[in-house]
């Protein structure tokens, strides 16, 4: 389960913290156009990281079986990962 929560939550938290800092500085310096640029850049990077991780989660049962995990447990874990995607 930790393998499921850590990749997406950490990258989203990191981008959110960075975005909050950069947008606050841009707004304080009255450079409002940079606020939009930072926001769109963060959205792009979040999506570009979430898509490969989501694909990995969809095929998690095959990955876990190839790593030597129990097949029944691997299928259940894959179901849980896919449920978290929806």
Image (cartoon, rainbow, N blue to C red):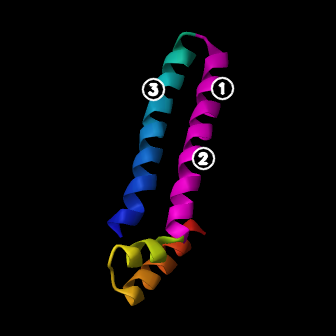
- The quarter of the picture where the C terminus appears is bottom right
27 or 36: nearer the viewer: 36
Question: Which residue is denoted by mark 1 in the rendering?
Answer: 36
User: In the rendering, at what x and y percent does residue 35 appear?
Assistant: 61, 23
Q: Residues within 10 Å of mark 3 (few under 14, many from 20)?
A: few
Q: Which mark, by number, is residue 21?
A: 3
Please tell me whether mark 3 or mark 2 is closer to you in this view: 2
- Which of marks 1 and 2 precedes in the sequence? 1
- Which of marks 3 and 1 precedes in the sequence? 3
**Magenta-drawn stretch contains 38:** yes
Residue 26's quadrant in the figure? top right
User: In the rendering, at what x and y percent does residue 24 appear?
Assistant: 50, 22
Describe the element under mark 2 as helix, strand or loop: helix
Q: CA distance from mark 3 to mark 2?
A: 20 Å
User: Magenta segment range?
Assistant: 30-58
Residue found at x 51% / y 80%: 79
Q: CA distance from mark 1 to mark 3?
A: 13 Å
Circles 2 and 1: CB atoms closer than 8 Å: no
């Amino acid at each position: 389960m930790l393998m499921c929560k850590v990749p997406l939550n950490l990258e989203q938290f990191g981008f959110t913290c960075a975005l909050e800092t950069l947008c606050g500085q841009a707004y304080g310096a009255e450079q409002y156009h940079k606020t939009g640029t930072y926001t769109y850049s963060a959205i792009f990077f979040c999506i570009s990281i979430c898509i490969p991780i989501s694909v990995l989660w969809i095929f998690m049962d095959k990955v876990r079986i190839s790593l030597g995990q129990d097949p029944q447990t691997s299928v259940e874990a894959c179901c849980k990962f896919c449920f978290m995607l929806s």
